[in-house]
Amino acid sequence: MAERVRGLAGVPATESEISDIDGANGILMYRGYPIEDLAKYSTFEETTLLLLDGKLPSAESLKYFSEQLYKNRYLQYHIIDLMKTLPGSAGPMAMLQTAVSSLAMFYPGSECLTGSNVCTDLDYTRTSTFKVLGRIATMVAAWTHIKEGYNPIEPRDDLNYAENFLYMLNGNDPEPFLAKVLDVCLILHAEHTINASTFSVMVNGSTLSTPYSVISGAIGCLSGPLHGGANSKVLTMLREIGHVNNVEKYIDEQLESKRVIWGMGHREYKTKDPRATILEGLIAQLREEKGGDIDPLFDIAKRVEEVCADRLGHKGVYPNVDFYSGLLYKEMGIPEDQFTTIFAIARSAGWMAHWREQLADNTIFRPTQYYKGEKQRSYVTMSER
Amino acid sequence: MAERVRGLAGVPATESEISDIDGANGILMYRGYPIEDLAKYSTFEETTLLLLDGKLPSAESLKYFSEQLYKNRYLQYHIIDLMKTLPGSAGPMAMLQTAVSSLAMFYPGSECLTGSNVCTDLDYTRTSTFKVLGRIATMVAAWTHIKEGYNPIEPRDDLNYAENFLYMLNGNDPEPFLAKVLDVCLILHAEHTINASTFSVMVNGSTLSTPYSVISGAIGCLSGPLHGGANSKVLTMLREIGHVNNVEKYIDEQLESKRVIWGMGHREYKTKDPRATILEGLIAQLREEKGGDIDPLFDIAKRVEEVCADRLGHKGVYPNVDFYSGLLYKEMGIPEDQFTTIFAIARSAGWMAHWREQLADNTIFRPTQYYKGEKQRSYVTMSER
């Protein structure tokens, strides 16, 4: 038996055709398409289908998928009732794990996942994708109202995925530019090879549990502080810095005391994260849209990036996707405690693609252990302990 | 990079001190203690502490743990309200995954799991164990009433874990012998090295998500038809056989047409599963208790075992733990659709032990993939597809 590898780092757990990272050159591709092209030309709806099916959809196929996705925005009132039983103080990720798990009961129909007869029918996996992805954004937006004691804002049929989400947050017609930015953010977060939560999708999916069960588990995995949540920490850091003039001093102090600079560096990339570059472009556009009148935190962030490039660039430490995404979400009026749920919404597209891939060539996950415990010993009764 | 191993079979994912299986000799040990001794001398409460702490508890420690466990039997009425929003037709495993996930919101207090400061304090993991294990049995019993439209039966303080569970099912004082059998069944199912659901505990726990999130995810993983649920299929099979005289013909036909004989064979054991031997002893006792007046399915099962020993014994295929456990659960009045939730209750003890072990020496799980997909290609606009 080979040595144990901590966290299975570098151990191949699957063959996959979904996405690929070239960290040395800063390239991320979904199904062979560079992320820059998808951010520029695609939509979250189309990217979801691409991830699932492996090819860009026909106009007809995209239209059908989008219609179904939009129809599945509505939550049964029992699900709203369920959310109303939760404490208003509840963390949105725990709420989302619970609410997504409940969908298995409201939308059973997983007969097709039975022991000897795994259905890898694309229709089934696509239908499950509508059902999960349609409702998950509604749950997140609804929670911002329910936690305050108000009824949620009903979804609208005439808006695309990103637009409708922003609409459900505050009931206003979404600003087209911000909706486009959110759409791009969803595309950028939709998939990123095998990380802990995507791996949990493969493990849970391998027992043929329902898609709701699988996605709920992945949300739980993503909720851990070692996984999601860095983008809200970037905001906290930028606020702590407070002014462009303080940046240099702050960064040098952090580096000297070996503290984390949030949003900097990524284990996969030795260059700037290609997603951060795309977000930076959007911020430049935002600045233009607003005639320069944007949150001073953007300037602080820009300066942090410059100072870090100077101090850390030679080590391959550059901004990652979290560095700018939180700033943009804030601009859209998304509450900071909901940033990780946006990640979960976007990543559900990739999770469903990996779930489908797992089913198509399934073996239950059952690694082994090195037993390092006690050798056989005799039970000692209480009176003799 | 090494070859991918399907399902990571035989790949060591951890070092563990919790349990060990010697499949050639039919030995299962928890923390070095043979399962036969634990079934004979221990209780589920004590076994849970043993799994968690690595040693048999002192009288004082066991008393404190049991008291806390019993205090944590009570569900907040908001949790009952949540369960009432679920469709009565809901599968009990989906209910349980959802209800356990909700505990993260009703009992937050996971501050101790933060990025750089993992608390591996035994107190924290023990407190989390009370909270999960105390409530999970109440949820399962409560659901048998709530799904029918009735309020659940309140737990009682004066009964042990197994007794109280049987009490909550029907409100009658539990039969001492059946309560003891359930206690043994819980011990036998509490732990079994690394399978898919226990592995999911390690993966989800590695991101430092909450214990509720981790156990909820594991319940989802266990709910897949490839993982839990074989014991109710044994019952269906025994009913299908219908009479002792039909056994030989049935088994031979199944073998000829290469169909599964439920409850027979286990990938880890080349002998009879030691847990099945223990259950068989309990059935003999039950027969004596009842003066021979027991369900004819027991006789059919006995005959299935004899015929299978004759036909399959040379291949190392013998009864596993599922072969007799369903029959015993039925005798206790546990509804068949709840058998897998009993497994989940028992296994929560082992899951919490593995969660603790993961935290004590944590690295986030992030295996890798072989990318077999498309090479880089250019985006094609809709009009050109």
Image: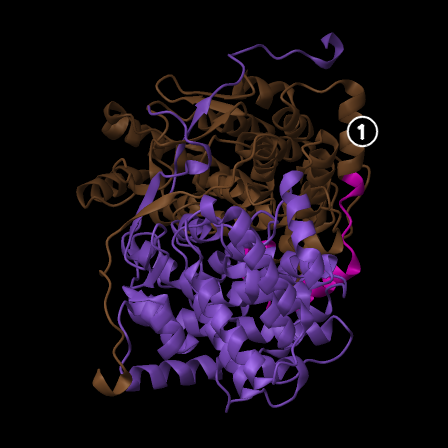
Chain colours: A purple, B brown
Q: Residues within 10 Å of mark 1 (few under 14, many from 20)?
A: few
Q: Residue furthest left?
A: B256
Residue at the location (47% across, 41% down)? B365
- In this rendering, would A89 be left or right of B54? right
B197 lies above or below A181: above
Q: State the image coordinates of residue A374 (x, y, percent, origin top left).
A: 54, 14
Q: Quadrant of the N terminus of chain A?
A: top left
Q: State the image coordinates of residue A351 (x, y, percent, origin top left).
A: 43, 60
Would you identify the image quadrant in which residue A380 lies?
A: top right
Q: State the image coordinates of residue B299 (x, y, percent, origin top left).
A: 42, 35
Would you identify the image quadrant in which residue A305 lies?
A: bottom right
Residue at the location (74% across, 57% down)? A240
Residue at the location (35% across, 22% down)? B271
- In this rendering, would A357 be left or right of B336? left
Q: Chain of mark 1?
A: B
- In this rendering, would A269 be left or right of A375? left
Frontmost residue, B287 versus A137: A137
Residue type at the position of mark 1 = Tyr
Residue A277 in view (yes/no) = yes
Frontmost residue, B29 versus B168: B29
- The secondary structure type at the circle numbered 1 is helix
Q: State the image coordinates of residue B37 (x, y, percent, origin top left).
A: 57, 17
What span is colored magenta in the figure?
Answer: B70-97
Circle 1 residue: B64
